[in-house]
Image (cartoon, rainbow, N blue to C red):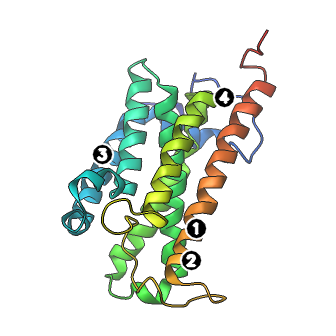
Amino acid sequence: MDIRGLFESDVPREDLPWYVAPLPAPLENLGLNLAWLVVAVNLGGTAFGFYYYSLQFLETPVEMWPFVPDSPMATLLIALALAAWKLGRTQEWLVALAFFGNVILGGWTVYVHLAFWDSFGYLHPLMRQFLIWSHAAMVVQAFLLHRIADFSPAAVGVATLWYTVDTVVDYFVPVRGDLHHTTLPIVRGEEMYLGATALGVATTGAVVLLVVAIYLAMLTHVEKRRAGRLERPG
């Protein structure tokens, strides 16, 4: 097998600006060529994630369970998006959901571990490193997706709607039971930075990353149209 061939691909790659396509082309090509391996790794991460959230499931009303396993749902979405693409059945809405989920939840976990660094001392150092780097990898893999979909406004709208509702239920309006964000390592009301509480710090990260995901997704669509791949409306 020609190893060099793994870093080449026939999948079109537009000349997009770095801020929507930050990965080097060879790395993107490698990810696409190993798509089934990426799918398998994400399914493994999904299974681990559901186990990781098992105690939180027990404390949450059943009807609110879809709002609990945020990161595992994001890895499941990207596994499904890549599998659908490999099977020739790409779904724009699924790709958009996967992009949003991996940017928001992958980035949020890294952010929270850094912001609450001292409070995560109860975790084994290896587990902590695993959580940080595996979630950073979620953000990285999200930037493969511009190669397989166009981030249509309708698809971005679906993802925006879901993750806006998810953010509201997680941090602002619990609907049933308590707020449904991932359990924090300290009491929510404890003051941290500039008078902000722990909940405020966590919420800030989630809201900012939601805005970033919306902006990047729409900007990707605009830049792909500018690059000439998308047809302009007549």
Q: Quadrant of residue 65?
A: bottom left
Q: Are marks 1 and 2 in contact (CB under 8 Å)?
A: yes
Frontmost of labels 4 and 3 is 3
Where residue 229 is drawn, which disc sits there?
A: none
The residue at which mark 2 appears reads as 201
Question: Compared with residue 128, is residue 86 higher up or lower down, i.e. above or below?
Answer: above
Q: Amino acid at mark 4?
A: Arg
Question: Compared with residue 101, is residue 28 higher up or lower down, i.e. above or below?
Answer: above
Q: Earlier in the sequence, mark 2 or mark 3?
A: 3
Quadrant containing the N terminus is top left
Q: Quadrant of residue 173?
A: bottom left
Q: Are marks 1 and 4 in contact (CB under 8 Å)?
A: no
Q: CA distance from mark 1 to mark 2?
A: 7 Å
Could you tell me residue 35's position as x and y percent? 42, 35
Q: CA distance from mark 2 to mark 4?
A: 38 Å
The residue at which mark 1 appears reads as 205
Q: Are marks 2 and 3 in contact (CB under 8 Å)?
A: no
Task: Tell me the residue at 40%/66% (across/down).
Answer: 181
Frontmost of labels 1 and 3 is 1
Q: Amino acid at mark 3?
A: Leu
Q: Amino acid at mark 1?
A: Gly
Could you tell me residue 12's position as x and y percent? 63, 23
Quadrant containing the C terminus is top right
The residue at which mark 4 appears reads as 13
Q: CA distance from mark 2 to mark 3?
A: 30 Å
Q: Amino acid at mark 2?
A: Val
Between 39 and 61, the residue placed more toward the observer is 61
Task: Tell me the residue at 30%/66% (across/down).
Answer: 177
The residue at which mark 3 appears reads as 43
Task: Tell me the residue at 33%/57% (across/down).
Answer: 69
Dot 3 falls on a residue whose secondary structure is: helix
Res. 137 in view? no
